């Protein structure tokens, strides 16, 4: 059964893909990775992997989605059948669905932290508070399964409501309102950060390339981040691509998605570091950068409570537009495969993801030590889930690159890409050779981590 649905406008795919791409990866993960890996050196490598690996795979994944015009699982089954390719390629669809499922389960819990901080900021309860009080409040949040669960439930429910309303009314309607609003908020927060904080220190931290800071570790972190930030290898882009107008250019669209995603990560990085440095704090604080260091910085700045609240609203909104792209591929499959109604399909996906989210919720408190996964892998259950997705994402990306590069026929790809011979050749070289080699490197780092 083919879904004949297409986005209302030629440009909607771009909007939807940017909505998927821009999220916690840009606002939370990118700044702390840059902070831990030497700023400018990390960004240089990150930009390189986006260009050489991210964009080519982004094109490949969109191409597969638009060419099949089906949900990722059904689409891969269809393409392998019509191309006489091994049905083993269908694993791309299944792995993507599994990864989307796991990621949504913890993405929603972390987005829930931002809900908590929005409340703390606007209520003024952090204004003027000491650093100890603020980091203590983060520990209190993580130590409370009830609070974490409540925020997780609200966040995933809202995401489900949007997708349940359908791709036009729900997803397109939501994005057309949210995306401009989010961009405006980011501009305001950046302006505030540059004026009130230490703009010069932030610029020099992010844009000074100190080659001594380059490390293999940084390379691999940058590569993993480029998959996560562009939403690759999970069927999210494939599912949205299935609704993409045949007229829109694949190559130009992919370029713009990557450019906007990178621009927003840089704007967020500048804003956060200007505020953090302006308060005399440090960059290399890891995942606590957004939830501990930044609130401490806001607490000491004029108007910090309001601007801090506004900032966390941005985090929630950006996470929401990403979460809906994780629901869509699985929900669309349930609709196509089992003729379920869309609301029922979304409800099923959301309820199961919500339940899996309990694993993440408990990993920060009751299950923070002494569980089976600690015994087996030396990691919390949440760390194991994250680890699994860190394998599934690049692996999915690798298979997508190989499938598009080697299995689809040249004429079909040329027609779908509708670009010059030169660009096609470059793309083909990148997906056939460069991206697979790069992904192999990611595994070199990720797999030994099992030992903990
Ligand atoms: N790209 C999102 C971010 O940077 O936060 C995360 C994400 C969304 C990953 C959707 C994968 C996905 F399918
Ligand atoms: Na992103």
Image (cartoon, grey):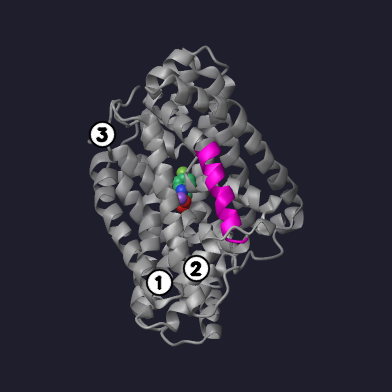
Marks 2/1 in contact by CB < 8 Å: the verdict is: yes
Give percent across and percent down for residue 183. 32, 57
Task: Give the residue number, with chain letter if any, for mark 2.
Answer: 202
Q: Circle 3: is it few (<14), some (14-19), or many (20+) Cα within 10 Å?
A: some
On-image quarter of the N terminus: top left
Q: Position of residue 130 (x, y in %)?
A: 51, 87
Residue at the location (71% across, 47% down)?
A: 445
Which quadrant of the structure image shows residue 393?
A: top right
Q: CA distance from mark 3 to mark 1?
A: 35 Å
Residue 245 visible in the displayed image: yes
The reply to whether the magenta stretch includes residue 407 is no
* On screen, residue 354 above or below 53: below
| Type of secondary structure dominating the magenta stretch | helix
Residue 63 against residue 411 in the figure, above or below:
below
Ligand 2 within 8 angstroms of badge 2 C-beta: no
Q: Which residues are magenta?
A: 38-54
Mark 2, residues whose alpha carbon is within 10 Å: few (<14), some, or many (≥20)? many
User: Which numbered circle lies on residue 10?
Assistant: 3
């Amino acid at each position: 059964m083919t879904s004949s649905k297409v986005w209302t406008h030629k440009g909607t795919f771009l909007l939807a893909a940017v909505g998927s791409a821009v999220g916690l990866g840009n606002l939370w993960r990118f700044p702390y990775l840059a902070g831990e890996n030497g700023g400018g050196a990390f960004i240089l490598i990150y930009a390189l992997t986006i260009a050489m690996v991210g964009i080519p795979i982004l094109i490949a994944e969109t191409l597969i989605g638009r060419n099949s015009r089906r949900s990722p699982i059904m689409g891969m089954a269809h393409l392998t059948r019509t191309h006489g390719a091994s049905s083993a390629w269908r694993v791309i669809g299944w792995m993507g669905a599994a990864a989307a499922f796991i990621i949504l389960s913890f993405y929603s819990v972390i987005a829930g932290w931002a809900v908590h901080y929005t409340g703390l900021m606007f209520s003024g309860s952090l204004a003027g508070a000491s650093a100890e009080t603020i980091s203590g409040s983060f520990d209190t949040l993580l130590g409370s399964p009830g609070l974490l669960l409540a925020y997780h439930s609200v966040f995933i429910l809202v995401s489900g409501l949007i997708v349940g309303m359908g791709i036009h009314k729900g997803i397109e309607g939501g994005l057309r309102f949210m995306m401009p609003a989010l961009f405006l908020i980011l501009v305001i927060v950046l302006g505030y950060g540059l004026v009130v904080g230490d703009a010069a220190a932030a610029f020099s931290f992010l844009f000074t390339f100190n080659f001594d800071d380059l490390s293999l570790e940084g390379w691999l972190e940058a590569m993993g981040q480029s998959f996560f930030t562009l939403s690759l290898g999970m069927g999210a882009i494939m599912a949205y691509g299935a609704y993409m107008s045949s007229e829109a250019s694949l190559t130009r669209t992919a370029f713009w998605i990557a450019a906007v995603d990178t621009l927003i990560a840089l704007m967020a990085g500048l804003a956060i570091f200007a505020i953090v440095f302006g308060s005399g704090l440090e960059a290399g604080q890891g995942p606590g950068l957004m939830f501990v260091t930044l609130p401490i910085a806001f607490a000491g700045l004029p108007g910090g409570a309001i601007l801090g609240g506004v900032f966390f609203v941005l985090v929630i909104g950006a996470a929401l537009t990403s979460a809906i792209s994780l629901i869509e591929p699985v929900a669309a499959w349930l609709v196509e495969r089992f003729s379920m109604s869309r609301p029922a399909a979304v409800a099923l996906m959301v309820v199961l993801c919500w339940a899996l989210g309990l694993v993440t919720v408990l990993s920060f408190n009751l299950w923070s030590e002494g569980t089976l996964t600690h015994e087996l892998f030396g990691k919390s259950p949440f760390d194991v889930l994250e680890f699994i997705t860190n394998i599934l994402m690049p692996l999915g990306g690798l298979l997508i690159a190989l499938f598009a590069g080697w299995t689809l026929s040249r004429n079909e790809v040329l027609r779908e890409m509708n670009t010059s011979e030169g660009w096609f050749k470059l793309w083909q070289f990148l997906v056939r050779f460069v991206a697979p080699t790069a992904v192999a490197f990611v595994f070199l780092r990720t797999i030994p981590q099992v030992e903990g």
